[in-house]
């Protein structure tokens, strides 16, 4: 637990890049992001509600992987319930569901 404001306990609130990094780590491509921005609130991430449209892919197909993530996907034989080498070997059927909307949308409410 940390103190977001003086004397007010808070839980961990991940940054946008932290959430997106977690999706990429788990082998997802981000197809779309929608953020709800409450007008009158400070323009910081803990006042926003964010939704992602993501597609599960093989680790090698994750778009925008940095060197560290490539290394992790290649060298981590087993991380929790995810086996990256097994994901890489499997053949998956492509979903017929697609997303053709905006990559990023900010909605003021």
Image (tube, rainbow, N blue to C red):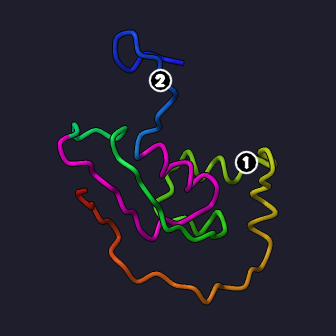
Residue identifier under label 2: 10
Give the side of residue 77 with respect to residue 95, left or right: right
Element carrying mark 2? strand
Query: Which numbered disc covers residue 75?
Result: 1
The residue under the point 34% across, 17% down is 5
Q: Is mark 1 on a helix, strand or loop?
A: helix
The label on residue 61 is none
Q: Is residue 6 left or right of residue 87?
A: left
Q: Give residue 84's quadrant in the image.
A: bottom right
Whether 25 is drawn above or below 94: the answer is above
**Which is in the foreground here, disc 1 or disc 2?**
2
Q: Of residues 23 and 10, which is closer to you in this image? A: 10
Please state the horizontal and vertical placement of residue 77, each as a whole percent of the image: 80, 49
Where is residue 59, by image quadrant?
bottom right
Residue shown at 63% from the left, 69% from the top: 56
Q: Distance between the residues labelled 1 and 2?
A: 35 Å
* Magenta part of the chain: 17-40
What residue is at 22 percent from the left and 37 percent from the top? 42
Magenta residue check for 48: no
Which is nearer the eye, 35 or 81?
A: 35
Residue 94's x, y, as percent? 66, 85
Q: Residues within 10 Å of mark 2 (few under 14, many from 20)?
A: few
Total tally of numbered discs in the picture:
2
Q: Is 36 drawn above or below residue 6 in the view shown?
A: below
- Percent of width and height locating residue 6: 34, 11
Tell me residue 108's x, y (percent).
Answer: 23, 57
């Amino acid at each position: 637990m940390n103190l977001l404001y003086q004397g007010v306990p808070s839980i961990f609130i991940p940054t946008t890049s932290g959430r997106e990094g977690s999706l990429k780590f788990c082998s997802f491509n981000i197809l779309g992001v929608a953020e709800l921005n409450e007008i009158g609130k400070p323009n910081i991430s803990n006042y926003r509600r964010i939704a992602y449209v993501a597609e599960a892919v093989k680790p090698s197909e994750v778009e925008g992987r940095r060197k560290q993530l490539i290394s992790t996907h290649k060298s981590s034989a087993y991380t929790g319930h995810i086996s990256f080498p097994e994901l890489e070997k499997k053949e998956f059927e492509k979903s017929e569901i697609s997303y053709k909307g905006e990559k990023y949308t900010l909605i003021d409410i």
